[in-house]
Amino acid sequence: MVIAIRQEQLDATHRLFSKLRHWNASEKALGDLRNSFPEGSHDAWLLKCAAVNWLYNTNVLAIARMATHVHDVVGGNFQDGVERLSV
């Protein structure tokens, strides 16, 4: 089943998100991290996974193993600064 999202729903989401200072700061920090480490190396993924784990309190205990998994799944495939999964 496909449920269409109306423009007013998207607008409301954008207005709500713009008021969430913590989320905006987190998003900026993650963007800065991405720009500082754009390559798909395992070390870069370890830093990114650790940052997401800390900022969003995801409680992943095996963060190094998670970084290895993300690195393997994504495979370091980057084009124009956008992470792309190989299918």
Image: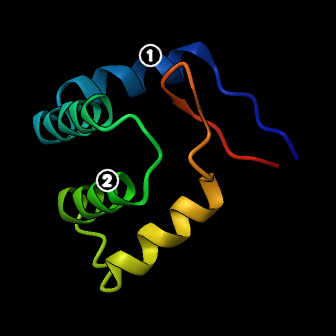
Q: Label 1 near label 2: C-beta < 8 Å?
A: no
Q: Which residue is drawn at 23% across and 56% down?
A: 51
Percent across and percent down for residue 9 are: 52, 24
Residue 22: quadrant of the picture: top left
Percent across and percent down for residue 14 are: 37, 21
How many tags in the picture? 2
Any mark on residue 46, and which? none
- Indicate the amino acid at tag 2: Lys
The answer to whether 62 is drawn above or below residue 38 in the figure is below
The answer to whether 45 is drawn above or below residue 29 in the figure is below
* Alpha carbon distance from label 2 to label 1: 29 Å
Q: Residues within 10 Å of mark 2 (few under 14, many from 20)?
A: some
The answer to whether 49 is drawn above or below residue 80 in the figure is below
Q: Which coloring applies here?
A: rainbow
- Indicate the amino acid at tag 1: Asp
Q: Residues within 10 Å of mark 1 (few under 14, many from 20)?
A: few
Q: Which residue is drawn at 19% across and 56% down?
A: 55
Residue 6: quadrant of the picture: top right
Q: Which of marks 2 and 1 is in front?
A: 2
Any mark on residue 48, and which? 2
57 left or right of 12 in image: left
Label 1 secondary element: helix
62 left or right of 41 in image: left
Percent across and percent down for residue 69 are: 54, 71
Q: Which of marks 2 and 1 is nearer the N terminus?
A: 1
Label 2 secondary element: helix
Percent across and percent down for residue 72 are: 60, 64
45 left or right of 56 in image: right
Q: Which residue is drawn at 11% across and 34% down?
A: 21
Q: Residue furthest bottom?
A: 61
The residue pinned by badge 1 equals 11
